Image: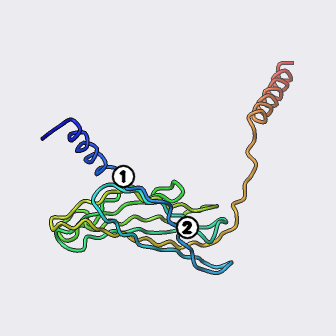
Amino acid sequence: MNTPLTASIALAAALLAGTAQASDPITVNMTGTAGGTFSAGSSHTISGAGSFEDVYKLDGYTGWSSINGALSTQILNSGSADIDISSVTLNGVGFGQTLTFFRGNLDGRETYTLPATDFAGPLTLVVKGSLLAGNNGSSVGTYSFSFRVTPIAAPSTSPIPEPQTYALFAAGLMAVGYVVRRRRSA
C-alpha cells in the first residue's frame, strides 16, 4: 500500500543516498627530523557509492615550508567501482589534474599534483569526489597521497608604501615641475 508516509520515507531515503559522506578530520603525522625534510602519506578506502569530502590535518610541522605532493586513484579491474575526484586542495591551493585511460575507463587513473609551493602554519588537505558503483557490484574504491615538506626561512617582506606616500610623492613632483616652469618663463 502506497501511503503518503511510505512515499515520504522513500523520498528521504533517496535524498540521503545522494548526500555527501563527510568525515571527521583525519590526522596524518609527518615524519622527519627538525631542520630536515618531512614526509606524510596515507591511503583512504571509500565504501559505498555516493559523494564524499575527506579532510586531513597534516601534523608535525607548522613553520614555513616548501611542499610538493601527489594524490592518485586507480581502477583495479574492468567493471569495478570508479572514484572520480572533483577537487584536491592544500590550505585552499588547488592541485593540477591528469587523467589517464586505464582498463577501458577514460579516467581510470586520476593523478593530482602540487608543484613545490610555499606554505606556513597548519596544513589541511581537502579531497572531494564521488564513488561510482561498478558493473560488477563493487562499491569500494581507494585513493592515496603523499607529501614532501621542506622547511624554509620565512619570506622577507618589504614595506609597501601607503597611498598617502604616493600622493605626497606626486605633490612633490608637481611642485618641482611648477618651479622649473616658472624659472623658464622668467
Q: Which percent across, then down, holds residue 68?
A: 51, 68
> Any mark on residue 178, and which?
none
Residue on which disc 2 sits: 58
Residue on which disc 1 sits: 20
> First in sequence: mark 2 or mark 1?
1
Residues under labels 2 and 1: Cα distance?
A: 23 Å
Q: In the figure, residue 186 lies in which quadrant?
A: top right
Q: Residue at x 70, y 67 (%)?
A: 153
Local SS, label 2: strand
Eye-nearest disc, 2 or 1:
1
**Camera-side residue of 49 and 152:** 49
Q: Is residue 51 left or right of residue 113?
A: left
Local SS, label 1: loop
Q: Which percent across, then down, holds residue 79?
A: 16, 68
Q: Which percent across, then down, holds residue 47?
A: 31, 65
Amino acid type of disc 1? Answer: Ala
Q: Is residue 147 left or right of residue 178?
A: left
Q: Residues within 10 Å of mark 1 (few under 14, many from 20)?
A: some
Amino acid type of disc 2? Answer: Leu
Q: In the figure, residue 66 lies in which quadrant?
A: bottom right
